[in-house]
Amino acid sequence: MAKISVLLCFIILFALGFVDCHRAQEKIGVYELKNGNISAKFTNWGASLVSLIVPDKNGQMADVVLGYDSIKDYINSSSPFGAIVGRVANRIKGAQFTLNGNLHKLVANEGHNTIHGGPRGFSRVVWRVIQFSYRSFDGEQGFPGDLVVNVNYMLVGHDTMIVTLKANALNKPTPVNLAQQTYWNLGGHNSGNILSHKIQIFGSHITPVDRQLIPTGKIVPVTGTPYDFLKPHTIGSRIKKLSNGYDINYVLNGGKGNKLRRAAVVHHKKSGRVLELSTTAPGMQFFTSNWNKDFKGKGGYIYKPHAGLCLETQGFPDAVNHPNFPSQIVRKGKPYSHSMLIKFSTTSPSAKL
Protein backbone atom coordinates (compact mmCIF):
# COMPACT_ATOMS: atom_id res chain seq x y z
CA MET A 1 0.00 0.00 0.00
CA ALA A 2 2.87 2.37 0.72
CA LYS A 3 4.12 2.17 -2.85
CA ILE A 4 0.64 2.78 -4.26
CA SER A 5 -0.04 5.89 -2.15
CA VAL A 6 3.32 7.37 -3.09
CA LEU A 7 2.74 6.79 -6.80
CA LEU A 8 -0.72 8.34 -6.73
CA CYS A 9 0.60 11.45 -5.02
CA PHE A 10 3.28 11.78 -7.69
CA ILE A 11 0.72 11.48 -10.51
CA ILE A 12 -1.47 14.25 -9.06
CA LEU A 13 1.40 16.69 -8.84
CA PHE A 14 2.65 15.67 -12.26
CA ALA A 15 -0.63 17.00 -13.62
CA LEU A 16 -0.74 20.21 -11.55
CA GLY A 17 2.80 21.27 -10.83
CA PHE A 18 4.28 22.64 -14.05
CA VAL A 19 5.82 26.08 -14.41
CA ASP A 20 7.32 27.53 -17.55
CA CYS A 21 11.06 27.89 -18.07
CA HIS A 22 12.47 30.30 -20.65
CA ARG A 23 15.67 28.27 -20.95
CA ALA A 24 14.15 24.99 -22.10
CA GLN A 25 11.53 23.63 -24.48
CA GLU A 26 10.50 21.20 -21.77
CA LYS A 27 8.54 22.39 -18.75
CA ILE A 28 9.90 22.32 -15.25
CA GLY A 29 7.78 21.39 -12.26
CA VAL A 30 7.86 20.78 -8.53
CA TYR A 31 6.47 17.45 -7.33
CA GLU A 32 5.68 16.11 -3.87
CA LEU A 33 5.66 12.67 -2.27
CA LYS A 34 4.13 12.02 1.14
CA ASN A 35 4.19 8.85 3.19
CA GLY A 36 4.04 8.41 6.94
CA ASN A 37 6.33 10.89 8.67
CA ILE A 38 8.15 11.93 5.49
CA SER A 39 7.24 14.61 2.99
CA ALA A 40 9.57 15.21 0.04
CA LYS A 41 9.55 17.63 -2.89
CA PHE A 42 11.46 17.28 -6.16
CA THR A 43 12.00 19.13 -9.40
CA ASN A 44 12.81 17.74 -12.82
CA TRP A 45 15.55 20.40 -13.16
CA GLY A 46 18.49 18.14 -12.41
CA ALA A 47 16.14 15.46 -10.98
CA SER A 48 16.74 17.30 -7.72
CA LEU A 49 15.54 16.69 -4.18
CA VAL A 50 14.19 20.11 -3.14
CA SER A 51 13.06 19.41 0.42
CA LEU A 52 12.63 16.58 2.89
CA ILE A 53 10.58 17.18 6.01
CA VAL A 54 10.98 14.78 8.94
CA PRO A 55 10.17 14.95 12.68
CA ASP A 56 12.64 15.43 15.52
CA LYS A 57 12.54 13.60 18.87
CA ASN A 58 9.69 15.87 20.03
CA GLY A 59 7.66 15.46 16.87
CA GLN A 60 8.60 18.88 15.51
CA MET A 61 8.93 18.90 11.74
CA ALA A 62 11.83 20.48 9.86
CA ASP A 63 13.23 20.54 6.33
CA VAL A 64 16.66 18.88 6.53
CA VAL A 65 17.71 19.63 2.93
CA LEU A 66 19.51 22.79 1.82
CA GLY A 67 18.11 24.46 -1.25
CA TYR A 68 16.21 27.39 -2.76
CA ASP A 69 12.68 28.79 -2.83
CA SER A 70 12.18 28.93 -6.59
CA ILE A 71 12.99 26.98 -9.72
CA LYS A 72 14.70 30.08 -11.10
CA ASP A 73 17.14 29.98 -8.19
CA TYR A 74 18.00 26.34 -8.94
CA ILE A 75 18.58 27.13 -12.60
CA ASN A 76 20.82 30.10 -11.85
CA SER A 77 22.74 28.50 -9.00
CA SER A 78 26.38 27.46 -9.29
CA SER A 79 25.83 24.79 -6.63
CA PRO A 80 23.78 21.70 -7.62
CA PHE A 81 21.72 21.46 -4.42
CA GLY A 82 20.00 18.07 -4.28
CA ALA A 83 20.67 17.22 -7.92
CA ILE A 84 21.75 14.10 -9.77
CA VAL A 85 25.25 14.73 -11.05
CA GLY A 86 26.78 12.96 -14.05
CA ARG A 87 27.37 11.61 -16.70
CA VAL A 88 30.41 11.09 -14.44
CA ALA A 89 30.23 12.50 -10.91
CA ASN A 90 33.25 14.06 -9.23
CA ARG A 91 36.41 14.93 -11.16
CA ILE A 92 38.16 13.72 -14.32
CA LYS A 93 41.78 14.81 -14.57
CA GLY A 94 42.72 16.96 -17.55
CA ALA A 95 39.12 16.79 -18.86
CA GLN A 96 39.99 13.74 -20.93
CA PHE A 97 40.26 9.96 -20.92
CA THR A 98 41.14 7.15 -23.30
CA LEU A 99 38.64 4.37 -24.00
CA ASN A 100 39.26 1.52 -26.46
CA GLY A 101 42.23 3.42 -27.84
CA ASN A 102 40.27 6.58 -28.52
CA LEU A 103 41.01 9.85 -26.70
CA HIS A 104 37.88 11.66 -25.53
CA LYS A 105 38.28 15.34 -24.71
CA LEU A 106 35.65 16.69 -22.34
CA VAL A 107 34.50 20.19 -21.45
CA ALA A 108 36.57 21.50 -18.54
CA ASN A 109 34.70 23.38 -15.82
CA GLU A 110 37.11 23.32 -12.86
CA GLY A 111 40.43 24.62 -14.05
CA HIS A 112 41.80 22.06 -16.52
CA ASN A 113 39.56 19.32 -15.12
CA THR A 114 35.95 18.22 -15.57
CA ILE A 115 33.69 17.97 -12.52
CA HIS A 116 30.20 16.43 -12.35
CA GLY A 117 29.96 15.84 -16.09
CA GLY A 118 30.89 19.34 -17.28
CA PRO A 119 29.22 22.77 -17.25
CA ARG A 120 26.05 21.21 -18.65
CA GLY A 121 26.08 18.00 -16.69
CA PHE A 122 22.99 16.09 -15.62
CA SER A 123 22.36 18.56 -12.77
CA ARG A 124 21.73 21.32 -15.35
CA VAL A 125 19.25 19.66 -17.70
CA VAL A 126 15.50 19.08 -17.68
CA TRP A 127 14.47 15.49 -16.96
CA ARG A 128 11.25 13.82 -18.07
CA VAL A 129 8.75 12.69 -15.43
CA ILE A 130 6.97 10.73 -13.77
CA GLN A 131 10.07 8.58 -13.53
CA PHE A 132 12.89 11.08 -13.95
CA SER A 133 14.43 10.23 -17.30
CA TYR A 134 17.09 11.91 -19.42
CA ARG A 135 18.63 10.92 -22.74
CA SER A 136 22.22 12.09 -23.08
CA PHE A 137 23.36 12.33 -26.69
CA ASP A 138 26.58 11.05 -28.21
CA GLY A 139 29.27 13.69 -27.72
CA GLU A 140 27.43 15.62 -24.99
CA GLN A 141 30.12 17.42 -22.97
CA GLY A 142 32.59 15.20 -24.85
CA PHE A 143 31.32 11.83 -23.60
CA PRO A 144 30.89 9.06 -26.19
CA GLY A 145 27.67 7.27 -27.00
CA ASP A 146 23.95 7.80 -26.44
CA LEU A 147 22.85 7.09 -22.88
CA VAL A 148 19.40 6.80 -21.28
CA VAL A 149 19.35 7.55 -17.55
CA ASN A 150 16.45 6.88 -15.17
CA VAL A 151 16.12 7.98 -11.54
CA ASN A 152 13.40 6.81 -9.15
CA TYR A 153 12.68 8.35 -5.75
CA MET A 154 10.39 6.28 -3.53
CA LEU A 155 9.15 6.69 0.03
CA VAL A 156 8.72 3.36 1.79
CA GLY A 157 7.09 2.81 5.16
CA HIS A 158 7.07 5.81 7.47
CA ASP A 159 10.76 6.63 7.57
CA THR A 160 12.69 5.57 4.47
CA MET A 161 13.54 6.96 1.05
CA ILE A 162 14.99 4.77 -1.68
CA VAL A 163 16.80 6.31 -4.65
CA THR A 164 17.53 4.11 -7.66
CA LEU A 165 19.71 5.30 -10.53
CA LYS A 166 19.98 3.31 -13.77
CA ALA A 167 21.61 3.95 -17.13
CA ASN A 168 21.70 2.10 -20.45
CA ALA A 169 24.29 2.66 -23.16
CA LEU A 170 22.55 2.54 -26.53
CA ASN A 171 25.53 2.14 -28.84
CA LYS A 172 29.06 2.99 -27.62
CA PRO A 173 30.87 2.11 -24.39
CA THR A 174 30.92 5.11 -22.05
CA PRO A 175 31.85 5.96 -18.47
CA VAL A 176 28.92 6.43 -16.08
CA ASN A 177 29.14 7.43 -12.43
CA LEU A 178 25.96 9.00 -11.05
CA ALA A 179 25.62 10.60 -7.62
CA GLN A 180 22.82 12.27 -5.69
CA GLN A 181 24.13 15.54 -4.26
CA THR A 182 21.83 16.50 -1.41
CA TYR A 183 23.19 18.82 1.28
CA TRP A 184 21.88 17.54 4.63
CA ASN A 185 21.51 19.40 7.92
CA LEU A 186 19.58 17.30 10.43
CA GLY A 187 18.97 20.31 12.63
CA GLY A 188 17.02 21.88 9.77
CA HIS A 189 18.30 23.63 6.67
CA ASN A 190 18.33 26.97 8.56
CA SER A 191 19.90 25.79 11.82
CA GLY A 192 23.54 26.81 11.26
CA ASN A 193 26.52 24.57 10.53
CA ILE A 194 26.86 20.79 10.72
CA LEU A 195 30.05 20.69 12.82
CA SER A 196 28.19 19.33 15.86
CA HIS A 197 26.71 16.43 13.85
CA LYS A 198 28.20 13.10 14.86
CA ILE A 199 29.06 10.78 11.97
CA GLN A 200 30.21 7.21 11.52
CA ILE A 201 31.51 6.19 8.10
CA PHE A 202 31.85 2.52 7.22
CA GLY A 203 34.92 2.96 5.08
CA SER A 204 38.37 2.00 6.35
CA HIS A 205 40.19 3.47 3.31
CA ILE A 206 40.09 6.62 1.18
CA THR A 207 41.36 7.58 -2.27
CA PRO A 208 43.72 10.50 -1.46
CA VAL A 209 43.84 13.50 -3.78
CA ASP A 210 46.31 16.12 -5.02
CA ARG A 211 45.93 19.89 -4.71
CA GLN A 212 43.35 19.90 -7.50
CA LEU A 213 41.33 17.24 -5.62
CA ILE A 214 42.17 14.64 -8.28
CA PRO A 215 42.82 11.12 -6.90
CA THR A 216 46.47 10.07 -6.93
CA GLY A 217 45.49 6.48 -7.68
CA LYS A 218 46.45 5.24 -4.23
CA ILE A 219 44.07 3.65 -1.71
CA VAL A 220 45.19 4.31 1.86
CA PRO A 221 43.83 3.47 5.33
CA VAL A 222 42.13 6.14 7.44
CA THR A 223 43.48 4.89 10.76
CA GLY A 224 45.27 7.64 12.65
CA THR A 225 44.13 10.41 10.29
CA PRO A 226 41.40 13.08 10.51
CA TYR A 227 39.45 10.94 8.04
CA ASP A 228 38.93 8.13 10.55
CA PHE A 229 35.23 7.94 11.35
CA LEU A 230 35.12 4.18 11.85
CA LYS A 231 33.89 5.08 15.31
CA PRO A 232 31.47 8.01 15.66
CA HIS A 233 32.95 11.49 16.06
CA THR A 234 31.59 14.99 15.61
CA ILE A 235 32.50 16.50 12.27
CA GLY A 236 34.04 19.54 13.91
CA SER A 237 36.32 17.56 16.21
CA ARG A 238 39.06 17.19 13.56
CA ILE A 239 38.10 19.48 10.72
CA LYS A 240 40.68 22.10 11.75
CA LYS A 241 43.41 19.57 10.93
CA LEU A 242 42.40 19.91 7.27
CA SER A 243 43.07 22.93 5.09
CA ASN A 244 39.40 23.61 4.34
CA GLY A 245 37.14 20.72 5.29
CA TYR A 246 36.16 17.25 4.18
CA ASP A 247 35.93 16.50 0.45
CA ILE A 248 37.14 12.94 0.01
CA ASN A 249 36.01 9.58 -1.39
CA TYR A 250 35.73 6.71 1.07
CA VAL A 251 36.19 3.11 -0.04
CA LEU A 252 33.20 1.48 1.61
CA ASN A 253 33.61 -1.75 3.51
CA GLY A 254 31.63 -4.80 2.48
CA GLY A 255 33.57 -6.25 -0.41
CA LYS A 256 32.96 -6.20 -4.13
CA GLY A 257 29.74 -6.59 -6.05
CA ASN A 258 26.55 -4.62 -6.50
CA LYS A 259 25.09 -5.40 -3.08
CA LEU A 260 23.64 -3.12 -0.43
CA ARG A 261 26.26 -2.09 2.12
CA ARG A 262 26.18 0.29 5.04
CA ALA A 263 27.81 3.62 4.23
CA ALA A 264 27.21 6.12 7.05
CA VAL A 265 25.20 7.04 10.13
CA VAL A 266 24.69 10.70 11.08
CA HIS A 267 23.23 11.90 14.39
CA HIS A 268 22.21 15.40 15.47
CA LYS A 269 22.02 15.44 19.26
CA LYS A 270 19.84 18.53 19.75
CA SER A 271 17.02 17.36 17.46
CA GLY A 272 17.62 13.66 18.01
CA ARG A 273 17.40 13.02 14.27
CA VAL A 274 19.38 10.11 12.85
CA LEU A 275 20.12 9.42 9.18
CA GLU A 276 21.31 5.94 8.16
CA LEU A 277 22.61 5.48 4.62
CA SER A 278 23.16 2.22 2.74
CA THR A 279 24.18 1.85 -0.90
CA THR A 280 25.22 -0.56 -3.62
CA ALA A 281 28.00 1.80 -4.75
CA PRO A 282 31.65 1.05 -3.83
CA GLY A 283 32.47 4.58 -2.68
CA MET A 284 31.07 7.64 -0.94
CA GLN A 285 32.19 11.26 -1.21
CA PHE A 286 31.99 12.99 2.18
CA PHE A 287 31.76 16.75 1.63
CA THR A 288 31.20 19.45 4.26
CA SER A 289 30.19 22.35 1.98
CA ASN A 290 33.58 24.03 2.13
CA TRP A 291 32.36 27.12 0.31
CA ASN A 292 34.33 30.33 0.02
CA LYS A 293 31.15 32.39 -0.27
CA ASP A 294 27.65 32.55 1.18
CA PHE A 295 24.52 31.28 -0.58
CA LYS A 296 21.06 32.77 -0.13
CA GLY A 297 18.77 29.79 0.36
CA LYS A 298 15.21 28.96 1.35
CA GLY A 299 13.34 31.72 3.12
CA GLY A 300 16.25 34.08 2.54
CA TYR A 301 18.43 32.13 4.98
CA ILE A 302 22.16 32.56 4.30
CA TYR A 303 24.06 29.28 3.95
CA LYS A 304 27.58 29.84 5.21
CA PRO A 305 30.55 27.43 4.93
CA HIS A 306 29.78 24.02 6.48
CA ALA A 307 26.02 24.66 6.35
CA GLY A 308 25.38 21.13 5.10
CA LEU A 309 27.02 17.78 4.52
CA CYS A 310 26.94 15.59 1.43
CA LEU A 311 27.06 11.81 1.41
CA GLU A 312 27.43 11.11 -2.30
CA THR A 313 27.53 7.38 -2.92
CA GLN A 314 29.42 6.77 -6.15
CA GLY A 315 32.13 4.96 -8.06
CA PHE A 316 35.66 6.13 -7.36
CA PRO A 317 36.49 9.59 -8.79
CA ASP A 318 38.56 9.76 -11.99
CA ALA A 319 38.29 5.99 -12.36
CA VAL A 320 38.62 6.35 -16.14
CA ASN A 321 42.25 7.33 -15.58
CA HIS A 322 43.06 4.77 -12.86
CA PRO A 323 42.90 1.13 -14.00
CA ASN A 324 43.21 -0.08 -10.39
CA PHE A 325 39.86 1.55 -9.49
CA PRO A 326 36.57 -0.28 -10.11
CA SER A 327 35.56 0.26 -13.74
CA GLN A 328 32.78 2.73 -14.56
CA ILE A 329 32.51 1.76 -18.22
CA VAL A 330 28.99 0.85 -19.29
CA ARG A 331 28.31 -1.08 -22.48
CA LYS A 332 25.22 -1.94 -24.47
CA GLY A 333 23.44 -4.84 -22.78
CA LYS A 334 25.31 -4.30 -19.50
CA PRO A 335 23.45 -1.45 -17.77
CA TYR A 336 24.53 0.72 -14.87
CA SER A 337 22.63 0.38 -11.58
CA HIS A 338 23.11 2.20 -8.28
CA SER A 339 20.78 2.31 -5.28
CA MET A 340 20.65 4.27 -2.03
CA LEU A 341 18.53 3.55 1.04
CA ILE A 342 18.14 6.50 3.43
CA LYS A 343 16.42 5.79 6.75
CA PHE A 344 15.43 8.42 9.32
CA SER A 345 14.77 7.89 12.99
CA THR A 346 14.95 9.69 16.32
CA THR A 347 16.35 6.80 18.29
CA SER A 348 19.89 5.48 18.43
CA PRO A 349 20.53 2.95 15.65
CA SER A 350 22.59 -0.17 16.11
CA ALA A 351 25.75 1.87 15.56
CA LYS A 352 26.30 3.47 18.96
CA LEU A 353 26.34 7.19 18.50
Image (spheres, grey):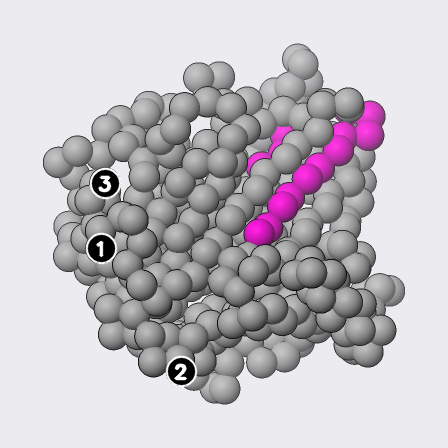
**Along the viewing direction, whichever of 160 and 117 lies nearer the viewer:** 160
Whether residues under marks 2 and 3 lie with C-beta atoms below 8 angstroms apart, the answer is no
* Image point (68%, 52%), residue name: 152
Between disc 2 and disc 3, the foreground one is 2
Say which label, 3 or 1, has the lower sequence index.
3
Task: Look at label 2 and name its amino acid.
Answer: Gln
Residue pointed to by mark 1:
353
Whether residues under marks 3 and 1 lie with C-beta atoms below 8 angstroms apart, the answer is no
Q: Quadrant of residue 202?
A: top left
| Residue 235: percent from left, percent from top | 23, 57
Task: Look at label 1 and name its amino acid.
Answer: Leu
Say which label, 2 or 3, has the lower sequence index.
2
Between disc 3 and disc 1, the foreground one is 1
**Along the viewing direction, whichever of 82 and 337 lies nearer the viewer:** 337
Of helix, strand and loop, which one carries label 2?
A: loop
Say which label, 1 or 2, has the lower sequence index.
2
Residue pointed to by mark 3:
230
Whether residue 190 is visible to the viewer of this picture, yes or no, is no
Residue pointed to by mark 2:
60
- Range of magenta residues: 162-177
